[in-house]
Amino acid sequence: MPDLLIVERAAEIVLNEARAMGASYADLRSVRISTETVRLANGQPDQIDRGRSAGFAVRVLADGAWGFASAPDLNEKTASALLKEAVAIAKASARLNAVPVSLAAMKSVQGQYTTPFQVNPFEVPLQDKIDFLRELDSALRANTAINETETFMEFRREEKWFYSTEGAAIIQTILHSGAGMVAAARRSRREAGERSFPTSGGQHVAGGYEVIANFGMREAAPRISEEAVLLLDAPVLPAQETTLILSGDLVSLQIHESIGHPLELDRVFGSERNFSGTSFATPEQRGALQYAAPIVTVYSDPSAPGGLGSYGYDDEGIPARRAALIEKGVLVDYLSSRETASRIGRDSTGAMRAESWGDLPLVRMTNINLEPGSGTLEELIAETDQGVTIETPAAWSIDDRRENFQLGGEVAWEIRGGKRGQIYKGAVYSGNTVTFWNNCDRIGGPAEYRIWGTPNCGKGQPGQNMRTGQGASPARFRNVRVGENA
């Protein structure tokens, strides 16, 4: 851990010298990241990786433009040098800046935040982790038709110090834990049935080692194995327009792709145009666009416990808070930074984050949560006379404006008379974002509500992978194209 006195002294130099160099604003962010991955393939260790990264960054606003510089070695001399570099970059950028940057107001904040946890995963013996993963592997292989397995755990701890010329002084420790398993029945490279749990890529949440037991992986192993075997010879989901029920983790993916990304305000203003596109949800539609059915309320909430997008303060020092994005179906706000919020005359929603110490903060998803309704997945199925239910994300594609998409799951079942029938592979569906969300007529309740973690959301040039969450229950949608060529 960087010595607190060294961090404070470096911040003091940056904040005291910034204005003399011509900066109207400056901040210093020091970060240390620890990671661990333990992965077994077919019951044998495949990847055991531990990593550490530490450094700091200086960000300034000078002549109405941003400047940024970072380095791995934190000391007084480097702090002063990075400040000079950041100011020089800002002044050079200002020559090309058509509109000077302005920032939404914020209160001076001093505080600390630590992810609540019981057991530090970095203190759990490696052998204990391997033994647990081997238990899962054995449970999957109890079905003798399963011939490929993967079990894994992943942990990340981020320690952050943030200081700004506006009086911010913040210390945070954010802890993430994740795990998952995959069972496959394979005859050849092309002939295979595969199922994942708790979701594809595993579930990741904010918390300690104790959360792994809450995922229910031991209990799910027999079902996951059986479904993988059934998928080996299952037919492909026929093309049709029907009622669609999505599992909570697929609703999470739908939120991520068709609500989270299009409501990133920097993207709305065109900052991602060259990389991953823009957004149809432009600012003049705020308060007017019927984005979804009236039963749909979606909010950003980095203060929610347990989410992969949970924290105490963003990387501009904005305190975490719940902010409605879609209220009773109507677009009401965006994920924003101080700069982007100022452009629409609103306060920042506290969504400015960087992947690491060497990255410039960007507007990123936090926990983007769909307000739950009532009932379980099985109750939604029982209430549906005819349709299809799809579970577990497997594929996704969406256009540059986030309007038209095709998503897919690992498995589908027909619904007939309120019961599951034929199992299918090739479980894809498609739609238009606004039409699809306006056709949502049922949302499951709190009993199956989860904040599903996405540990690898890409954005930016150079690219950054951010860790986000999407709170969701199972949900039902009418008149959806599913199946081949959906």
Image: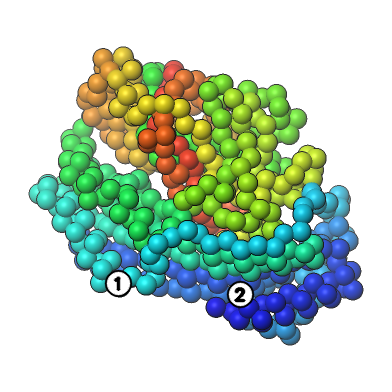
**Position of the C terminus by quadrant:** top left
Identify the residue shown where x is 63% and y is 56%: 313
**Image: 453 above or below 76:** above
In the visual, does 157 lie left or right of 106? Answer: left
Identify the residue shown where x is 59% and y is 25%: 328
Question: Residue pushed farthest left?
Answer: 144
Q: Which residue type carries mark 1?
A: Leu
Identify the residue shown where x is 21% and y is 56%: 136
Secondary structure of residue under mark 2: strand
In the visual, does 247 lie left or right of 437? Answer: left
- The part of the image, by quadrant, that contains residue 286 is top right
Q: Which mark is residue 47?
A: none
| Residue beneath disc 2 | 55
| Residue beneath disc 1 | 126
Q: Is residue 234 visible?
A: yes
Provide residue 50's location: percent of width, then percent of height.
40, 73
**Position of the N terminus by quadrant:** bottom right
The Cα atoms of the two marked residues, 2 and 1, are separated by 27 Å
**Image: 87 above or below 187:** below
Most foreground residue, 411 or 140? 140
